[in-house]
């Protein structure tokens, strides 16, 4: 009987001590998701498909983004991606003005300049995407409610073209409005779905997201006439980009006073 009383007394002391500790350091409940802004820098490696794959090869995207994360893990924001590539697949590109002995390596075309010299002109894929975004983070555990599966939908405007880089400005056929007849300027609307893992570090520095995305663009060539093929191109296009995305970001979360004291 004495031993039982001693055990009950010991348990009562431990319970009271735990309650006092909870009052001092917190209730011990699972942490809740934080709310605030996320400033992001993203990068994509893209594999093209559909109509865009007929003109360009593998490409990259880099750009900034901003999201607002609610306390229930909903995401809302905007982003801007810059499209970069150096594989142009247009067999007929500038065929009517380039040197007939030019060696086509999908990146540099040769011309005869004003001085009668053969000059190499590189070509690139260049463009951009701007979009509004919405999505949600699905936590994979109760201890880290901000980390988990990130699902994000983007919708906006995409534009891309062939950047013909005649830096010396000494090829008359590639000056002014003539250049527009060869650059294949294309734009339109797009939607994009992203699924990946998002991680917020306790030190606020090692924050990242990594995953895959699929972009579908509904575009059209916007030039009135293509000089090298001597026709217009008003066909509706469907472009696809399959991407692997990674990003680093800075969270600016609202913090409670106890977080400042004891985190």
Image (tube, rainbow, N blue to C red):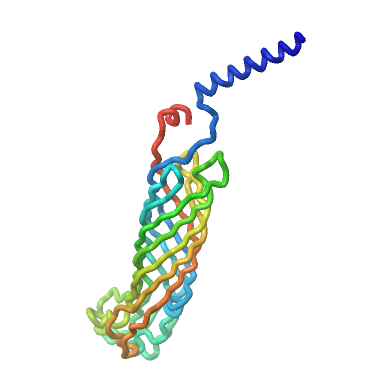
Q: Is residue 156 above or below residue 259?
A: below
Q: Is residue 251 above or below residue 119?
A: above
x and y percent of residue 5 in the render? 72, 11
The residue sitting at 38% across, 58% down in the picture is 63
Q: How many marks?
A: 0
Question: Residue 10's image quarter?
Answer: top right
Q: Is residue 41 visible?
A: yes
x and y percent of residue 96 in the render? 33, 90
**Which quarter of the rendered picture does the N terminus lie within?**
top right
Q: Is residue 35 above or below residue 110?
A: above
Question: Residue 7's image quarter?
Answer: top right
x and y percent of residue 239 in the render? 43, 74
Q: Is residue 203 above or below residue 91?
A: above
Front residue (pair 118, 73): 73
Judge left or right: residue 12 versus residue 114. Answer: right
The residue sitting at 44% across, 31% down in the picture is 259
The residue sitting at 30% across, 76% down in the picture is 166
Residue farthest to the top?
2
Question: Residue 143's image quarter?
Answer: top right
Residue farthest to the left?
176
Residue farthest to the front?
1
x and y percent of residue 119 in the render? 33, 81
Judge left or right: residue 253 versus residue 32. Answer: left
Q: Is residue 112 visible?
A: no
The residue sitting at 45% across, 44% down in the picture is 72
């Amino acid at each position: 009987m004495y031993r039982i009383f001693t055990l009950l007394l010991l348990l009562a002391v431990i319970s009271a001590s735990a309650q006092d500790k909870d009052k001092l350091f917190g209730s011990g409940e699972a942490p809740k998701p934080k709310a605030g802004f996320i400033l992001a820098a993203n990068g994509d490696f893209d594999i093209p498909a559909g109509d865009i794959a007929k003109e360009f090869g593998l490409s990259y995207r880099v750009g900034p983004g901003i999201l607002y994360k609610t306390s229930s893990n909903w995401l809302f924001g905007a982003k801007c991606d810059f499209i970069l590539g150096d594989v142009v697949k247009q067999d007929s590109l500038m065929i009517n003005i380039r040197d007939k002995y030019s060696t086509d390596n999908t990146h540099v075309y040769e011309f005869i300049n004003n001085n009668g010299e053969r000059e190499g002109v590189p070509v690139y894929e260049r463009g951009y995407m701007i979009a509004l975004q919405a999505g949600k983070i699905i936590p994979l555990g109760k201890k880290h409610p901000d980390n988990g599966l990130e699902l994000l939908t983007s919708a906006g405007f995409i534009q891309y073209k062939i950047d013909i880089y005649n830096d010396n400005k000494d090829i008359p056929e590639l000056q002014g409005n003539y250049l527009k007849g060869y650059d294949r300027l294309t734009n339109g609307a797009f939607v994009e779905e992203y699924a990946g893992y998002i991680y917020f570090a306790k030190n606020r520095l090692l924050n990242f997201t990594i995953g895959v995305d699929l972009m579908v663009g509904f575009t059209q060539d916007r030039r009135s006439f293509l000089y090298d093929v001597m026709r217009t191109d008003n066909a509706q296009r469907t472009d696809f980009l399959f991407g692997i995305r990674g990003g680093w970001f800075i969270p600016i979360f609202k913090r409670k006073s106890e977080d400042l004291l004891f985190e």
